[in-house]
Image: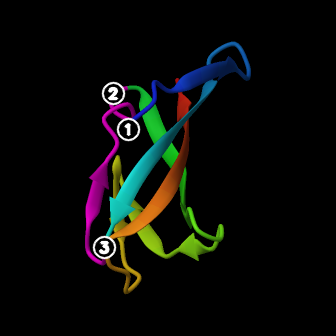
Amino acid sequence: MPATPSLKKKADVEYLAWAVYEVTVSQNDTITLPEFVNNVTLAQALLIQESDGATVTTTKSNNIVTVTQAVSNLPCILFAAGIKS
């Protein structure tokens, strides 16, 4: 379930933005992060397994995270961080 990104002032112009999502993923799934558009650039995405905290391999492009690891119906938490200018 997506969360509204939180914003924290870094300087006069930039803000840090982050969001946490609960997702169930399989290999080649894509996760679109609707909060990271317009003036919010996705800088990092970290997908971890709920069961043991191990990371799941992903790639990111714009506001889309793609699962590249061979997993199936795996409950995970996605941490996303970006910069709003």
Q: Which residue is mark 1?
A: 1
Crowd class of label 3 (few under 14; some 14 to 19; many from 20; radius 10 Å): some
Crowd class of label 2 (few under 14; some 14 to 19; many from 20; radius 10 Å): few
Quadrant where the N terminus lies?
top left
Q: Amino acid at mark 1?
A: Met
Of 30 and 8, the residue lying toward us: 30
Q: Main secondary structure of the magenta part?
A: loop
Check residue 37 for magenta coloring: yes
**Residue 65, picture quadrant:** bottom left
Give the distance between the C-alpha atoms of the residues marked 3 and 1, in whole angstroms: 17 Å
> What mark, if any, has residue 26 been given in the picture?
3
Residue range (magenta): 26-38
Residue drawn 37% across and 86% down? Answer: 70
Q: Amino acid at mark 2?
A: Asn
Q: Which residue is mark 2?
A: 38
Vertical relation: 7 (above or below) 72: above
Is disc 2 placed on a helix, strand or loop? loop
In the image, taking residue 69 as reference, residue 56 lies left or right, namely right
Query: Which residue occupies the extreme bottom position in the image?
Result: 70
Crowd class of label 1 (few under 14; some 14 to 19; many from 20; radius 10 Å): few
Residue drawn 36% across and 60% down? Answer: 24
